[in-house]
Amino acid sequence: MPYVEYDEVEAICSDCGRAFRSEEALAEHRAEAHGGTGPTPPKAVAVTVACSVCHQKFTSTAALVRHNARAHTG
């Protein structure tokens, strides 16, 4: 997944915390990764924390912890 700059973030997935450059990209992600279920996240959510390994940004520390457990532990 390409790195998304803070000022390029348009929407964030409410299920997994991934940041997207457009609402369309988020909709495609939700359909593929989450079956298109769940609430539509608010537009232009402020990003608050970033992963120190891959620099992906998240809206909560819980999302960051979940990301680290899934992406950076082996």
Image (tube, rainbow, N blue to C red):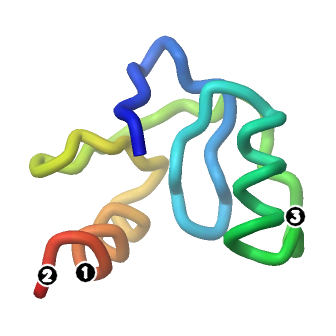
Callout 2 environment at 10 Å: few (<14), some (14 to 19), or many (20+)?
few
Q: Secondary structure at mark 1?
A: helix
Residue 52 drawn above or below residue 10? below
Quadrant, the C terminus: bottom left
In the rendered structure, the answer to whether residue 12 lies left or right of residue 55 reads right
In the rendered structure, the answer to whether residue 69 lies left or right of residue 67 reads left
Q: Choose between 29 and 12: the one closer to the eye.
A: 29
Q: Choose between 7 and 47: the one closer to the eye.
A: 7
- The residue under the point 53% across, 41% down is 19
In the rendered structure, the answer to whether residue 74 lies left or right of residue 40 reads left
Callout 3 environment at 10 Å: few (<14), some (14 to 19), or many (20+)?
few
Q: How many marks?
A: 3
- The residue under the point 60% across, 36% down is 20
Q: Secondary structure at mark 2?
A: loop
Q: Secondary structure at mark 3?
A: loop
**N-term-proximal mark, 1 vs 3:** 3
- The residue under the point 80% across, 33% down is 23
Q: Kindly check if marks 1 and 2 are in contact, taking CB atoms under 8 A apart as contact.
A: yes
Task: Give the farthest residue toward the top.
Answer: 7
Coordinates of residue 2 in the picture (x, y in percent) = 39, 35
Residue 63 drawn above or below residue 37? above
Coordinates of residue 59 in the picture (x, y in percent) = 48, 48
Of the residues shown, which amino acid type is indicated by label 2? Thr
Of the residues shown, which amino acid type is indicated by label 3? Pro
Q: Which residue is mark 1?
A: 69
Task: Give the farthest residue toward the bottom.
Answer: 74
Coordinates of residue 70 in the picture (x, y in percent) = 31, 79
Of the residues shown, which amino acid type is indicated by label 1? Ala
Q: Which residue is mark 2?
A: 73
